[in-house]
Amino acid sequence: MRYDRLIIVFLVMWLCFSIPVMGVTTYLGGRPQMSALISGVNEFSPGQDASIKVIVQNSGVQNLQFVNGGSISRDDLLTTAKTVSVGLSAGNAPIIVKSDPQIVGDIKSNEIRTVAITTKILPNANEGEYQIPLTISYTYLAAVDQPASDTLQSNYQLTSETFPITIKIKPQVKVEVLEAVPENLIVGSEGYLDLKIRNTGSEDGKKATVKLIRNGASPIIPTDSSVFIGDFPHNGTVTSRYKVTISGDAEKQTYPVDVVVTYENRDGDVVTSDIETIGIPIGGKISFAITSGPVQVVPGSQNVIQVDYQNTGVTTAYNAQSRLSVVDPFTSTDDTAYLGDLKPGQTATARYQMSADDTAAVKDYTLDTEIRYRDALDISHSSDIIHVPVQVQPKPASAGLMRALPIIVVIALMCIGAGYYFLVMKKKQ
C-alpha cells in the first residue's frame, strides 16, 4: 500500500515538471516614426478649389524583442501611433484651409493612411512654391512597468509633429476690367458694351479670346460674346466691343455680367482664366409725357386738337409716330401724327382731327395714346400707354342763336318779299 502512494506522488511530480513554460514576447525600444507627403497633383491654379491628398506613414521599428516567461501580454506595441489626427494650416501660403483636423485612427508600424484636405487657392495667389505645415498628433506607448506578476502599468504619451509639404501655384492670366462703357443699353432694347481689360497675372496668354458671359439670370444677354485679341502678355491691355440685348422685364438699375479670357499657356494647353464679374448700369425704357394741357371740345363740333409729347427717357427715339385712340362719343378722321426724332427732353406737337358727338355729356374724358419709335439699332418699339385728358365744354349761349340764324334769315326774306309785294300792288291801284 505504501508503494502505491509513492508511485502516485512520483507521477504527479513528473507531470508538473513535464508542463512547458508559457513565454510572452516582449518588445523593448522603438517608437512611432511618422512622415507625410502629398499624393498625386500638388500644382494648382489661383482661385481653384483644391483637394490636397496627403499620405501619412508610420515607419517605426522595434529595436529588441525577447520572450519572457511569466510576463503579462501587452495590448499595444511601442511603435503603434494611436488616435492619429491630421490637420493642415495655411502658414504663409495663399490658401484657405476648409477642412478641420481629421481623425484617422491607429496606425501600426509600416501602415499608411490617405487624408483628403479641402482648400481654396486665393484668386490673387502669385506663382511659386509654398511650404504649408501639416501637423500629425497621436498617442503612443512610451513605457511599460510590471511591478508584480499579475500587474501591468502602461505609460502613454501624447505628441505632435509638424511636417512641411510643398504645393505649387501655376502662372495664370488674370482679368482686371479697367473700363466698361455701355452704349444705348436700355430696357427691352439692344446696344453695345465696350470693355478695356488688363492682364494682371504672371502668365503671357497666346491666341487669347475675351468672352462676355451672361451671369445667371441677369437681363444682360450677350449677342456677340467672343472677341479674339491674340497675344495677351502680363500687364498687357486690350479693348473689345460686344453687342448685347437687354430683356424687357429688366428695371433701371445695375446688373452683373461675367468676363473671362481663354488662352494658350506656356505648356501649349488651352485654359480659361477665372471669372471677373462687373456691374453694368441699364437705363429705363424710353418714356414719354404729355406736356400740353387738357384738350377742350364742344358737343357737335369738329376740331383740330394739339397734343405735345416730350421724351423723358435717356436716349433718342428715332422716327417717332404717335397715335390717338378715340372712343364714343368722339370720332376722328386723322388719328396719327409724325413726330420725327426726339432727343432726351425734346418735345414735339401732334395734331389730330377729332369730332365730339352732339349728345356728348359735359364732363372730363380720357383718351389713350402711344408712340412707336426706333432705337439706335433701328429696332422698333412701342411706348407705354399715355392718357390724354379731354374736357367737353358746354355749348355757348350764342350757339342756339347761330343754329336758328338760317331760319330767321328765311323768315326775314319772306317778310321782306311780302312787304315788297304789297307795296307794288298798292302802287298799281
Image (spheres, grey):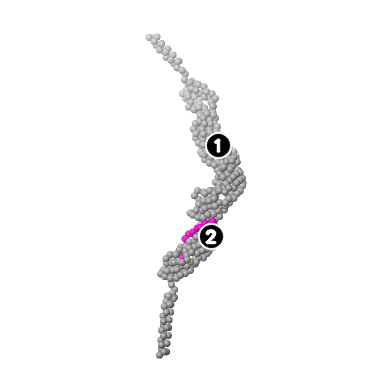
- Quadrant occupied by the N terminus: top left
Please tell me whether residue 219 is drawn above or below residue 369 in the rendered image: above
Three-letter amino acid code at disc 2?
Tyr
What residue did someone put label 2 on? 318
- Residue 304's place in the image compared with 41, above or below, is below
Task: Return the x and y of residue 150 as percentages of the image width and height.
Answer: 46, 23
Q: Where is residue 203? Give x, y as percent.
A: 60, 43
Q: Position of residue 89 (x, y in %)?
A: 55, 38
Report whether 9 appears left or right of 106.
Answer: left
Question: Amino acid under label 1?
Answer: Val
Observer-nearest of 301 and 152: 301
Q: Is residue 380 left or right of residue 427?
A: right
Answer with the quarter of the image where residue 399 lies. Answer: bottom left
Residue in view at x 42 percent, y 79 percent: 410
Q: Is residue 289 visible?
A: no
Q: Nearer the viewer, residue 326 or 399?
A: 326
Q: Which residue is mark 1?
A: 41
Task: Kindly give the residue lying farthest to the bottom in the view shown.
Answer: 429
The magenta region covers 373-390
Q: Earlier in the sequence, mark 2 or mark 1?
A: 1
Q: Which residue is drawn at the image coordinates 59% and 49% (left, top)?
A: 197
Q: Is 378 colored magenta in this rendering?
A: yes
Give the structural element (helix, strand or loop) at label 1. Answer: loop
Give the label, 2 or 1, closer to the camera: 2
